Image (cartoon, rainbow, N blue to C red):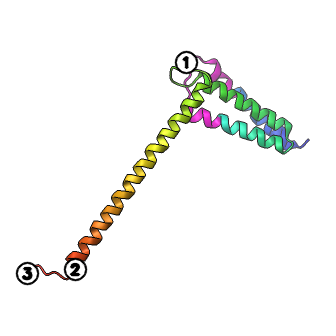
Amino acid sequence: MMWQDLVFLAGSTLSIVFLAPTIRDATAQVPLGSSVPSMTIGAVYALTYATMGMTFSALGSLGVAAMWSLIVSYRAPGPETGPKNVLRFVRSTVRLADRTAKRASRRGRRLATDRQESSHGAQSGHGQSSD
C-alpha cells in the first residue's frame, strides 16, 4: 500500500464528515449545479483510484460520491426528490446549452449581416463625390 492512498482516504473521510450536517439538515437546499458535478467527480475519482490499485482512496471517493448523491436526491431545491433530480439537472443543462447555441448563432448571423452591409456600403460609396 502506498502512503498516498491513506492521504486521499483521509481527505475523503473529512469530506464525508463535513457533508454529513447538510444531509441531516432537512431545511438545507444545495443547488443541483453544485451537487451533481461534485457527485460525478467523486465517482470518476473512485473509478480512477480503483484502476490505479488505490483501494482505500477508491472507497473514500465512492463514499464522497454517495454523500453527494444523497444531497442531490434529498437536499436540492424544488418539489422532486430522489434520482429524478439528476435528470432534472441534465434537462436544464441541455436547455441552457441549446439557448446559448441559438444566441451565438443569431449573433453570428447579425455580425455577418453587419459586415456585409458595411462592406457593401464602402464599395458603393467609393468613388462617388458629394457634389
Q: Which residue is mark 3?
A: 131
Disc 2 crowd rating (10 Å Cα; few below 14, some 14-19, many 20+) is: few
- Image quadrant holding the N terminus, namely top right
Q: Which residue is mark 1?
A: 27
Q: Position of residue 99 (x, y in %)?
A: 43, 43
- The residue type indicated by label 2 comes to His
- Image quadrant holding the C terminus, namely bottom left
Q: Position of residue 74 (x, y in %)?
A: 60, 21
Residue 131 vertical placement versus 26 (above, below):
below
Disc 1 crowd rating (10 Å Cα; few below 14, some 14-19, many 20+) is: few
| Direction from residue 117 to residue 19 in the image, left or right | right
**Disc 3 vs disc 1: Cβ atoms closer than 8 Å?**
no
Q: Is residue 26 magenta?
A: yes
Mark 1 vs mark 2: which is more N-terminal? 1
Q: CA distance from mark 3 to mark 2?
A: 14 Å
**Range of magenta residues:** 18-38
Q: Secondary structure at mark 2?
A: loop
Q: Nearer the viewer, residue 40 or 98?
A: 98
Question: Can residue 31 be seen here?
Answer: no
- The residue type indicated by label 3 comes to Asp
Q: CA distance from mark 3 to mark 1?
A: 76 Å
Q: Which residue is mark 2?
A: 126
**Disc 1 vs disc 2: Cβ atoms closer than 8 Å?**
no
